[in-house]
Image: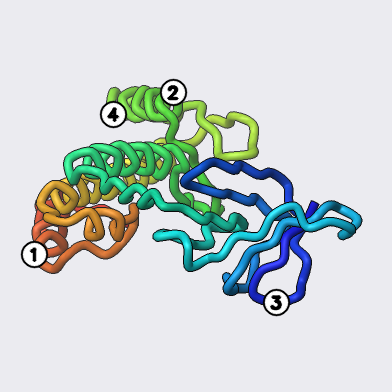
Amino acid sequence: MYITTGTSKHYTVLNQQIAADEVRYALESVPAALGATVSLYTADGGMCLRTDTVADYQYPRIEGNAIILSNVAPAEPVEPLLAEVQKDKLAEINAACDAAITAGCDVTLSDGTAGHISLSIPDQINLSTAQEAVKAGGSGYAYHLDGSLCEVYPAADIAIMAKAATAHILYHQTYCNHARMWVKRCTTVVDVHAIAYGTALPDDLAQHMAAVIAAAGGGNA
């Protein structure tokens, strides 16, 4: 079956619901406009099954690819509560922070070798163990750059990797803390939705974050 409305163009009907107070046609394509009438025809166009006058309905409308002729007011969209949106955003920020930390950071070793280290929890534990062994007097410790086999790195390189990891983790944990505060002080849903992990913080939070990182000994993005 198909309908015509607004123009002579035919719109294939995928589904129809016809009741006393409402007629709905789900169509294969989005209709350009509602005309004065909506007519339903058999697939071959040989018979008009019904014609509705749009003006006879209080709430005629197009929603997506559907034509709705109704005397029932459409339901008002329910706005989510601010607290619910904030809760979801905080969870999103936490997850993004964890992913950013785990992704790790770039390092340049004492011989000029450039590489990258991941910082999953096991990686962090391994690097911390290596750092402690070096601090205790060890000349080197086994570790690995991403994509490489483990090697025994000299104490200087273990220190470089540990320092880079500490700065990386400090930056993201501190940013996450300040981004969470930003979300919590928002007063509208729109403001919360506008925040994404990595977005520049408001000036006061950015300044406070910079002071915290400086006091803690540094950090980078």
The residue labelled by disc 2 is: 122
Q: Which mark is residue 7?
A: 3
Tell me the distance, in whole angstroms, between the alpha carbons under discs 1 and 2: 35 Å
Is the C-beta separation of discs 4 and 1 under 8 Å? no
Q: Is residue 126 left or right of residue 11?
A: left
Amino acid type, callout 1:
Asp
Query: Nearer the N terminus, badge 1 or badge 2?
Result: 2
- Nearer to us of marks 3 and 4 is 3
Tell me the distance, in whole angstroms, between the alpha carbons under discs 3 and 2: 66 Å
Classify mark 3: residues with Cα within 10 Å, few (<14), some (14-19) or many (20+): some
Amino acid type, callout 4:
Lys
Amino acid type, callout 3:
Thr
The residue labelled by disc 1 is: 204
Residue closer to the observer: 146 or 27: 27
Classify mark 4: residues with Cα within 10 Å, few (<14), some (14-19) or many (20+): few
Classify mark 2: residues with Cα within 10 Å, few (<14), some (14-19) or many (20+): few
Q: Is residue 198 visible?
A: yes
Callout 3: helix, strand or loop?
A: loop
Residue at x-position 76% and y-position 75%: 8
The residue labelled by disc 4 is: 135
Q: Position of residue 37 (x, y in %)?
A: 61, 68
Residue 80 placement: quadrant: top left
Is the C-beta separation of discs 1 and 2 under 8 Å? no
Q: Is residue 49 left or right of residue 56?
A: right
Q: Is residue 170 visible?
A: no
